[in-house]
Image: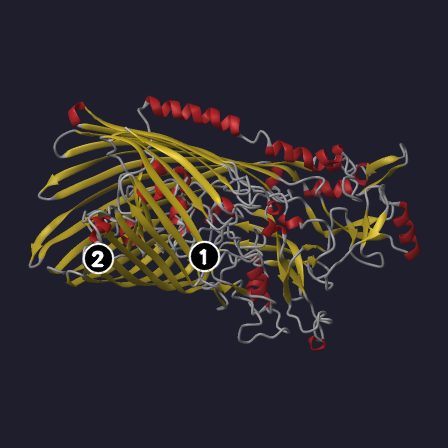
């Protein structure tokens, strides 16, 4: 069954069905005159318009303003940079901005099934649910659901946005709830689309990894034109992406080293003064070639006088090779099975296919009124291989089991054993095969109008819907496994039969006896009986109605008092269904029951800019928000901007921001998974059931945000320099989050008795379940510095014979704190934590620097990109030998808690083959991870032996393509 499942996954996949649906969407888009450009118009990326001398409208405020004079820091990424990198979605480029934490990418899907193919925006490491994503300043229907992956529920999937129509992306890197609405605690990502496109744009590109996998095709077509004598304009397009993903951990040499943690317990927990089993070594060792010590592919006896007896499929036995193992925890180093079960099957980077289409039309009813209508459709299909069943908690096998080898039965008799504990990893049943389909529809209609006397109106209504479904084929069913394994000989037929069938248990009807002894021993009939398909579907609907006006209220001593004000109504609805087994939480891993809930929100805001002088102003905003689930809250912002000279600008903001829990955080049903947990009470690593779920008692989060910075734009010869340095301080009270199973267990052990109620232990004191539900944590704090420098120099400065421009752009974020404080007052600071330990979110490095050196000329352009990640700690909750306070007797001691600095180099280039006026053909190429640098191999996470959030796990990749403009 396992091999059959693999063939099903690897051959047909879902290409045919998606291609058919893609063809239909493409035909519909072309019928509308749709097309996507390969590159948005030249705007503000690394060639930011301040360097070119052209003003742009930034969106750090609801009040339109030009240049970089907003008191709230704004980082701008242009469509040109997206095209240079050959990015298949805007998230790929945004995640390289140091202020972002790429928690949701194809490389972080790993073993998790839900939200495959989704890419979300996570500013400041505060979570994607605290970063508000807009399209042209308007809300977007969410696309992600609840589950165990790093993509939070209720977030916007950036894959659904047609990257080839993006003119630029404005990132507001400070609290913006008062101006933009709830969810903007960390900031705003505003995708500005090129709705004025004229002509036709097309592109095709292909990419592949050095290892021969991760093949990707991207096709796009776009077009725009005016009509009705220039009174109307239409732009539309379609884009198709096929990312075929990679192999599993063992397709990469660095991953096949299979580093993981090995427990080193005390000789006697009651007498720690006796030391640990491996004397002088810490509680946790990070070692290579780890394997599961407490279960094997064949199955083994893990307790009693027959401990270590392992089974061959033919009924013979042999003694398990424990390698380096100290008698506690899950893992050993060396010996055992040929591969580590926890790193098998699932791809390093998951495959997905998607198609997006978008159309925007507008018409000038008069000189002062413009009506617009736009619609988009996106479809994503993704797949992954999940975990095989891992019965690390032993099955109790009775002496009369029908499949018990005779030699083992004899030894049981000799020792007087009525039962034996057998643990098994069911590779012969195979992994769960996960498949996700997500369709997102969005329609927006509205009007822009000049009201006279300098006042403008902007009103719109949006309807959005996401239809999400996921299936998990070949998923084992807990109750059926229990029935099938407990097999005896039927005295009437002298054949194996399920004991429950003989006893007349109706719940066991159809049971097929399952042989637990030896890899390959289960019969096809038994496998079919114990497996099923987990299914969940969710429909998310969003209605938004908004009207806003802006203009000059009155003239004051230094200029007009500019005002923006408006009201907005939003209604989010989520409903879903799931199969009966999932609702009963009877699958080994399952999506739980369907969700059913809705939230209504009314908001009203006022924003004003008060000029104090020719070079100074104050900016303020206030917003009243009323939630149907938690009542009313008020947010506000005050900002100051002062330019004492034409090359120096000082800016600062202070804001109160809010975010109410979304539907999934409130009403999400319990979902089951299994996670590895180090039990500080026993010193043993255990595999425990972990339940995730919503909490209807959650209250809104409240954040206090400070930003203060300086912008320098001095004149340096013929070059152009811009430098900004901004400090940020965000303190979020009542943060809605899950602590993580490991943190809950650790906090309970440390004295947080209120958390002990979430931990269930069995009769032998072993952890059997952790309820990792959403809670209003006490405080979430992050502080740090954002720095951006950009310099552009015409090469003709050095010689009239030299052409082109050389430009340099460097973005850096320094993180001083990323602190989570739970209800007990205990805190964890993940600033400087480069690891993503199992059952915990990824930390953020102390700093990341991303630099772009670009040479632009006609007809050639090239860019070198350098991304540097600072050294840091694997886990800031642990202490390694190079840290103060290290003591191997401590329960949080570890053999190596250091990760060195890491640097990646990428190249891209393009060449103009032909040009005739506005018509041209370009070829381009990209090499990512030029030096094929492996990631750190000794930082185990839920994805394997490294942190897939921060480090490249695919290796060197190549992209080539062609762009046509007409």
Residue 626 shows which numbered tag? none
Q: Callout 2: helix, strand or loop? A: strand
The quadrant where residue 430 appears: top right
Q: Residue at coordinates 27% horizontally, 40% vertically from top-left? A: 858
Q: Nearer the viewer, residue 134 or 605?
A: 134
Check disc 2: other Cα within 10 Å, few if <14, some if 14-19, many if 20+.
many
Q: Are marks 1 and 2 in contact (CB under 8 Å)?
A: no
Report x, y in % for residue 831. 45, 64
Q: Residue furthest bottom?
A: 273
Q: Residue at coordinates 72% horizontally, 40% vertically from top-left? A: 428
The answer, for residue 379, to whether it is visible in the render is no
Q: In the rendered image of this protein, does residue 657 appear above or below residue 84?
A: below
Is residue 583 found left or right of 183 in the rendered image? right
Of badges 1 and 2, the one in the foreground is: 1
Q: Nearer the viewer, residue 367 or 669?
A: 367
Q: Classify the position of the N terminus by image quarter.
A: top right
Report x, y in % for residue 572. 39, 41
Q: Earlier in the sequence, mark 1 or mark 2?
A: 2
Q: CA distance from mark 1 to mark 2?
A: 41 Å
Q: In the rendered image of this protein, does residue 189 appear above or below residue 11?
A: below
Q: In the rendered image of this protein, does residue 706 appear above or below residue 184?
A: below
Q: Callout 1: helix, strand or loop? A: strand
Residue under pointer 1: 903
Report x, y in % for residue 660. 39, 52
Residue under pointer 2: 620
Is residue 384 found left or right of 339 in the rendered image? left
Q: Nearer the viewer, residue 586 or 213?
A: 213
Check disc 1: other Cα within 10 Å, few if <14, some if 14-19, many if 20+.
some
Report x, y in % for residue 156. 40, 43
Is residue 501 found left or right of 569 in the rendered image? right
């Amino acid at each position: 069954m396992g091999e059959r499942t693999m063939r099903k996954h690897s051959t047909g996949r879902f290409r045919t069905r998606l291609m058919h649906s893609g063809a239909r969407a493409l035909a519909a888009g072309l019928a509308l005159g749709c097309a996507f450009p390969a590159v948005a118009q030249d705007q503000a990326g690394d060639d930011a318009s301040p360097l070119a001398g052209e003003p742009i409208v930034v969106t750090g405020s609801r009040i339109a303003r030009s240049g970089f004079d907003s008191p709230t820091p704004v980082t701008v990424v242009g469509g040109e940079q997206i095209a240079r990198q050959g990015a298949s979605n805007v998230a790929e480029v945004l995640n390289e901005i140091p202020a972002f934490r790429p928690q949701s990418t194809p490389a972080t899907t790993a073993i998790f099934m839900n939200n495959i193919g989704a890419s979300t925006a996570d500013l400041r490491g505060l979570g994607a649910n605290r970063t508000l994503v807009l399209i042209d300043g308007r809300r977007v229907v969410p696309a992600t659901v609840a589950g165990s992956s790093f993509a939070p529920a209720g977030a916007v999937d950036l894959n659904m946005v047609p990257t080839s129509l993006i003119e630029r992306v404005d990132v507001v890197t400070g609290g913006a709830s008062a101006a933009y609405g709830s969810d903007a605690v960390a900031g705003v990502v505003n995708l500005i689309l090129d709705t004025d496109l004229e002509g036709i744009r097309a592109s095709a590109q292909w990419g592949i990894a050095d290892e021969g996998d991760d093949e990707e095709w991207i096709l796009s077509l776009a077009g725009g034109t005016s009509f009705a004598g220039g009174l109307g304009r239409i732009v539309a397009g379609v884009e198709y992406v096929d990312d075929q993903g990679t192999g599993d951990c063992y397709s990469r040499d660095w991953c096949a080293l299979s580093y993981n943690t090995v427990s080193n317990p005390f000789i006697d927990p009651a007498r720690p003064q006796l030391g640990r089993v491996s004397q002088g070594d810490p509680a946790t060792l990070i070692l290579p070639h780890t394997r599961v010590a407490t279960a094997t592919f064949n199955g083994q006896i893990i307790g009693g006088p027959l401990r270590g007896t392992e089974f061959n499929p033919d009924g013979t036995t042999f003694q398990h090779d424990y390698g380096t193992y100290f008698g506690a925890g899950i893992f050993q180093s060396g010996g055992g099975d040929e591969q580590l079960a926890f790193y098998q099957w699932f791809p390093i980077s998951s495959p997905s296919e998607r198609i997006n289409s978008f159309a925007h039309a507008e018409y000038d009813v008069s000189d002062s009124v413009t009506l617009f209508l736009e619609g988009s459709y996106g479809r994503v299909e993704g797949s992954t291989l999940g975990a095989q069943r891992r019965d690390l908690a032993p099955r109790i096998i009775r002496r009369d089991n029908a499949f018990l080898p005779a030699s083992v039965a004899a030894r049981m008799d000799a020792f007087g054993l009525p039962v034996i504990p057998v643990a098994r990893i069911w590779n012969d049943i195979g992994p769960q095969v996960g498949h996700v389909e997500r369709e997102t529809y969005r329609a927006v209609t509205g009007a822009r109008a000049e009201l006279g006397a300098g006042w403008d109106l902007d009103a719109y209504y949006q309807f959005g819907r996401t239809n999400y479904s996921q299936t998990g084929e070949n998923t084992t069913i807990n109750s059926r496994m229990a029935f099938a394994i407990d097999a005896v000989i039927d005295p009437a037929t002298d054949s194996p039969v399920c004991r429950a069938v003989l006893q007349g248990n109706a719940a066991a009807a159809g049971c097929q006896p399952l042989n637990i002894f030896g890899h390959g021993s289960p019969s096809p009939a038994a496998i079919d009986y114990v497996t099923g398909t987990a299914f969940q579907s969710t429909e998310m609907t969003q209605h938004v109605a908004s009207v806003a006006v802006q203009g000059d209220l009155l003239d004051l001593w230094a200029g007009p008092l500019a005002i923006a004000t408006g009201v907005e109504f939003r209604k989010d609805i989520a409903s879903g269904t799931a199969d009966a087994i999932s609702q009963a939480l009877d699958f080994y891993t399952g999506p739980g029951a369907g969700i059913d809930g809705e939230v209504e929100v009314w908001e009203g805001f006022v924003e004003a800019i008060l000029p104090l002088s020719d070079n100074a102003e104050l900016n303020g905003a206030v917003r009243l928000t009323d939630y149907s689930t938690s009542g009313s809250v008020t947010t506000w912002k005050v900002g100051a901007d002062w330019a004492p000279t034409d090359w120096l600008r000082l800016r600062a903001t202070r804001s109160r921001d809010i975010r109410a829990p979304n539907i999934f955080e409130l009403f999400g049903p319990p979902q089951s998974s299994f996670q590895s947990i180090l039990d500080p009470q026993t010193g043993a690593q255990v595999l425990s059931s972990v339940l995730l779920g919503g909490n209807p008692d959650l209250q809104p989060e409240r954040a206090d945000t400070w930003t203060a910075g300086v912008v320098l734009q001095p004149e340096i010869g013929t070059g152009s320099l811009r430098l900004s340095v901004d400090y940020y301080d965000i303190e979020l009270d009542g943060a809605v989050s899950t602590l993580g199973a490991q943190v809950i267990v650790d906090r309970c052990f440390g004295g947080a008795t209120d958390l002990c109620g979430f931990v269930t232990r069995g009769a032998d004191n072993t952890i059997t379940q952790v309820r990792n539900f959403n809670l209003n944590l006490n405080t979430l704090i992050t502080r740090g510095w954002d720095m951006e420098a950009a310099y552009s120099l015409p090469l003709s400065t050095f010689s009239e014979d030299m052409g082109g421009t050389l430009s340099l752009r460097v973005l850096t974020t320094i993180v001083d704190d990323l602190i989570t404080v739970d209800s007990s007052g205990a805190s964890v600071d993940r600033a400087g934590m480069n690891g993503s330990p199992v059952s915990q979110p990824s930390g953020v490095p102390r700093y990341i620097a991303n630099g772009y050196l670009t040479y632009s000329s006609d007809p050639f352009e090239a860019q070198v990109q350098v991304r540097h990640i600072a050294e840091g700690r694997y886990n800031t909750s642990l202490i390694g030998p190079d840290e103060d306070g290290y003591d191997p007797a401590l329960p949080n001691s570890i053999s190596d808690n250091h990760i060195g600095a890491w640097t990646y180099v990428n190249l891209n280039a393009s060449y103009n083959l032909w040009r005739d006026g506005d018509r041209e053909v370009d070829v381009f190429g990209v090499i990512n991870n030029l030096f094929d640098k492996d990631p750190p191999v000794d930082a185990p996470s839920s994805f394997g032996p490294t942190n897939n959030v921060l480090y490249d796990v695919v290796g060197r990749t190549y992209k080539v393509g062609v762009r046509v403009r007409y």
